[in-house]
Amino acid sequence: MASQDIIARSATTTPSPSVREQEQVAKLIDTTKCIGCKACQVACAEWNELRDEVGHNHGTYDNPADLSSETWTLMRFTEYENDAGNLEWLIRKDGCMHCDDPGCLKACPSPGAIIKHANGIVDFNQDHCIGCGYCITGCPFNIPRISQKDHKAYKCTLCSDRVAVGLEPACVKTCPTGAIVFGSKEDMKEHAAERIVDLQSRGFEHAGLYDPDGVGGTHVMYVLHHADKPSLYAGLPDQPVISPLVGLWKGVSKPLALLAMGAAVLAGFFHYVRIGPNRVEEDEHPSAPDTSVHEVDPAVHVYDPHKPGPQGDQRP
Amino acid sequence: MDLNRRQFFKVAAIGLGGSSLAALGMAPAPAFAEQIRHFKLTHTHETRNTCPYCSVGCGLIMYSQGDTAKNVAQNIIHIEGDADHPVNRGTLCPKGAGLLDFIHSPSRLQYPQVRKPGSSEWTRVSWDEALDRIADLMKADRDANFIEKNAQGQTVNRWLSVGFLAASASSNEAGYMTHKVVRSLGMLGFDNQARV
Amino acid sequence: MTNHWTDIANANLVLVMGGNAAEAHPCGFKWVTEAKAHNKARLIVVDPRFTRTASVADYYAPIRTGTDIAFMGGLINYLLTEDKIQHEYVKNYTDVSFIVKASFGFEDGLFTGYDASKRSYTDKSSWGYEIGEDGFARVDPTLQDPRCVYQLMKQHYSRYTPELASQICGMPQDSMKKIWEEIATCSAPGKTMTILYALGWTQHSIGSQMIRSAAMVQLLLGNVGMPGGGVNALRGHSNIQGLTDLGLLSNLLPGYLTLPGDAEQDYDAYIAKRSPKPLRPGQLSYWQNYGKFHVSLMKAWYGANATAENHWGYDWLPKLDIPGYDILKVFDMMSQGKVNGYVCQGFNPIAALPDKNRVMASLAKLKWLVVMDPLATETSEFWRNVGPYNDVQTANIQTEVIRLPTTCFAEEDGSLVNSGRWLQWHWKGADGPGLARTDVKIMSDLFIRLRKRYQAEGGAWAEPILKLSWPYKVPDDPTPEEIAKEYNGYAVADVTDATGAVIKAGQQLSGFGQLKDDGSTASGCWIFCGSWTEAGNQMARRDNTDPYGMKQNLGWAWAWPMNRRILYNRASSDPAGKPWDPKKRLVWWNGKAWGGTDVPDYKADVPPEAGMNPFIMNAEGVARFFARELMNEGPFPEHYEPFETPIGINPLHPNNKKATSNPAGRVFDSVWDTLGQAKEFPYAATSYRLTEHFHFWTKHCPINAVLQPEQFVEIGEALAKEKGIAAGDRVRVSCKRGHIEAVAVVTKRIRPLQVNNQTVHQIGIPLHWGFTGATRHGYLTNTLVPFLGDGNTQTPESKSFLVNVEKI
């Protein structure tokens, strides 16, 4: 239990316990050992009791086509012809990166809906989630998804229930080739360093570790053959940072909050966010999208119960 | 940063509201235990098994609810790899990791059934009805078509008009018994998936 | 597998060819990853498609489906020409020095003794060794005799030049040579390559010979019997090894014993024919003990009723008038209305057999069909009209179908044999659903009912049914323990073994060395003898320690034979009994006995100077490059085209039509008309599994259905462009036998190949969808596969056939 001390809560100023020295954990995903078998997808679904819809084949191996409230991790496949003209099939397990500086938590307006454990795990507590979708805006990796069943946000928990009792996450345990390993962040970095030496000896001169500074480092890290070009791996951000929108509300609006808004405002707020107008307005200053930062208009993540079918981002 | 008017207002409003929650004393309960997800394997019963899919032969641990007491049926709720197993060392592939859904598949057959000639549906029958019917059909055919001697008068003792396909995912014990029974009947049209 | 899963970690080089280990056997493939991580091993993948195994390979090269013998033949030529072989091993442990009969020959694609009218080698008398006056095979240790196996092999493969091999395989010459060079480094005595293959080699009309060609390469490199070496069949189902070991095939009995043919009316001659005398002095030729294995089997089956007087119940065994009534033969008979009833126990032939429409029509001719299965299979519902996926006239199908629910793995005790030959015991965790019963109970109950009928009414040849030994405490539901003890074997009377120890009547035997041919022992499967001894159930052992760090795990479960983990492991030491490499030690001579990190696959007390060779099951004592009369299309593997060839000729024998495809392949008369030509169906297709699914089972599991929900085919970018097909479009893939429709996955991973100076496109067709289960309905892929088979195993050619593809 000690390893599960909570050190940060969304929208909460109450100080968290901070006396005990707790080890930072990390999951290391070695894309160079990954065979794209999707055992991690199954183990995740089985452990967390998730069964997504039986979808369609869209002309690729990626299935389901995108993360959802019932698919917390999935493999993304990229066929890449390298400079030597040889084919590489880059396969990346996508899912929550458990940022050390979690943008979702920063963005979340509902107290305690997003928490960060002392060991680095960032977890969602659906009991407190109001379904506003702000975590999506805050996430530089486009991970959280709002459920159509209960209008709450879901993502990988790093199996905090398993980790709490001393077990590794389900995806880690099941991984047939040991492409996913788990331990202290320090050990994982050391393991990655060994892997990188091996990869360099096999001709991958740019092999490296993905542990991006822009989010304070992550508790899910990748070993990449081409660490110089993370975006090759199905759009893994080259330099992820938390959306400036999150900084804005923290900086500007927070002092305003202290003016003590009444309960009526709160009620209006919930109404607005959950079932309020779902209009998309023309940008007044359209600009080229920046692929390194995932900017999302919060409004489009609001679930509309009157609109059938899946909503939000649809990956091709 | 480009921020249009609408975005600005919306961000400001939500930030305002969210921050207000804490300010109004609606901070979450202080206990950290509430955040810990319930660990579902506490007090489950563990059984060792072997994955029935490919022939790597991965070790499994099946977790079932029910402590084998008389008044509760065992229900398997989770399967994961057996970490002691020298080959899989706790890992499972996408098929093995999903074995729970094989055990509880909606396609699992529950009762003996018969589809009558020309019919478009199944009829449920009892085990006695099913096995007696099969025994009658087999005996009638064997008695009618068994070949004791070939054209040269050699003893051959074979039965060719009924065949049997065995299951290469069944256990050795099932396979051995099947072989013992099938050969004693004189069957030669006998094969298993090793052929294909 | 000659070796086993964890042993792959000992390899220096891993060749995955004729298989897709990462996708089909992910947890076994981890030992490739371990070899790479801890042994600096390299991984080479050769496959028509760039698979997920290729995605983690150090080197990948494409190959045209069905041309692996051309690649291996070229490699054999390369190794011999460049003299990159493990000389001491080859000289001492193989048949290179044996002199072949002068009458043996090979001309324009055909070996001596071929009868074109019967499409088979009816006279194999020339396929043997010269026998000297001493009764032994003649040898020339200098290897200079032009008739010795070494010289004949060299001559045979001299035709497989890099140019020609490349022309046949479509693999660029530089890729081919790069791979050959790397493989050749494993001829160094301490360096080993492992070959991992699966159905990508077996499912061809020349599949058995592909595997032989790989074995020949491994022998030249001295890699058989070595840690991290061997020829390793990864195999498909969890107990496909066990059911093969237990002989559940038309012509077999348990333990690779064989049923007699019609002509074998004399019991003693039947045994003598299967008990070969050594072909060289001092060799063990262990099959000489055949009689002990056979008598012990008949004692297990017929108990006191099997006596010396009735030749241990010899007449109770059916005799074969043809080589075997394999599944293709039986369905051919069924299509002619010659089969009345059929039982499918956990087998879904309408999905697994070639040419679904033919299989469908054959099943409809049955009077009755019994299906035992945990799941609602397509076979059990073959009569149901499911639109385009199974477009049948239900009312016209007069077959009575009886479907029996069985338990699954989780709901019974028992053992399975993995591909490393480990017998592993498992335990029941819950009851089956509804009224499901175990296969053992169903078969036993059915037998009891049949026997009662024969007892009461009599009937045709009732003796074997009435005399069958049935000692189980609950006759209609024997326990797995009772059965396992029976196949292990027990003493029928007090017996004394070779050490002088007495085994009391009724006690369990501890190994097949104790078996007798006088009726004093019973053993239902001699190779499993030792699995359940007086010391208890050896299959349930769980000691996973590895004291030598050689990954042999001798205390985990039990491996046949006699817990030996690597077959032919005597060959891991030199003739003097010393390991070729101290880091690759398995068994060695310690001055008094053989022992080491594995159980010796050898006679443990024979000193090296006695000259007994490692291949103790062979009459030669050595491994065979020259297969003698044991293969049906010749003693040396030769490349023949798939029966549906995209190039129409065999570039090795362009002017001999008889040698285009396997001259001894299994083709029924009615099948020739169902074969397509490249003119109409220009693309070479291959079918396969995906990692997300297991055959036709996991489509019944919602969790797996999500991972690959809908049927698709893989098409290379070049062909897709030519045909105007985009990723996600629906396409129709057709052949002479029918068609399927599926989503197109357009990929860089399938490239057009230059074959025989023309471009050949390949199409990949996964096989997991059908008309029952949780996935979207799909067509049974085997609709497209031709109904023909390998010349030895009769395994269908599911990996190479011709199709056309069009956008819908």
Image: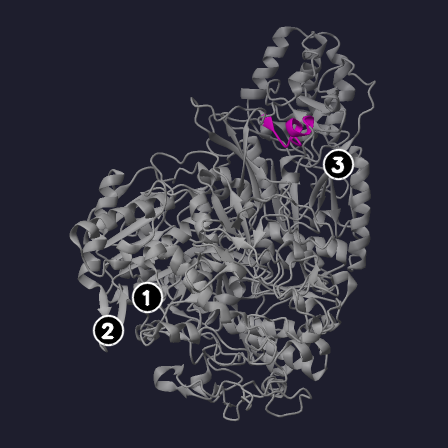
Residue B150 circle label: 2
Q: Are marks 3 and 1 on the same chain?
A: no
* A158 with respect to C135 (left or right): right
- Measured in 3D between alpha carbons, the distance from the residue under mark 3 to the one under mark 1, in whole angstroms, is 70 Å
Amino acid on which the number 2 mark rests in the picture: Asn
- C519 over C507 or under it: above or below: below
Residue B34 is one of the magenta-drawn residues: no
Image position, residue B165 (x, y; %): 36, 56
Image point (72%, 78%), residue name: C87
Q: Are marks 2 and 1 on the same chain?
A: no
Image point (23%, 78%), residue name: B152
Amino acid on which the number 1 mark rests in the picture: Glu
Q: Chain of mark 3?
A: A
Q: Which residues are magenta?
A: A153-165
* C460 with respect to C432 (left or right): left
Q: Are marks 2 and 3 on the same chain?
A: no
Q: Nearer the viewer, mark 2 or mark 1?
A: 1
Asked if one can make out residue C733 in the rendered structure from this viewpoint, the answer is no
Q: Nearer the viewer, mark 3 or mark 1?
A: 1
Q: Residues within 10 Å of mark 2 (few under 14, many from 20)?
A: some
Residue C309 circle label: 1
Label 3 sits on residue: A183
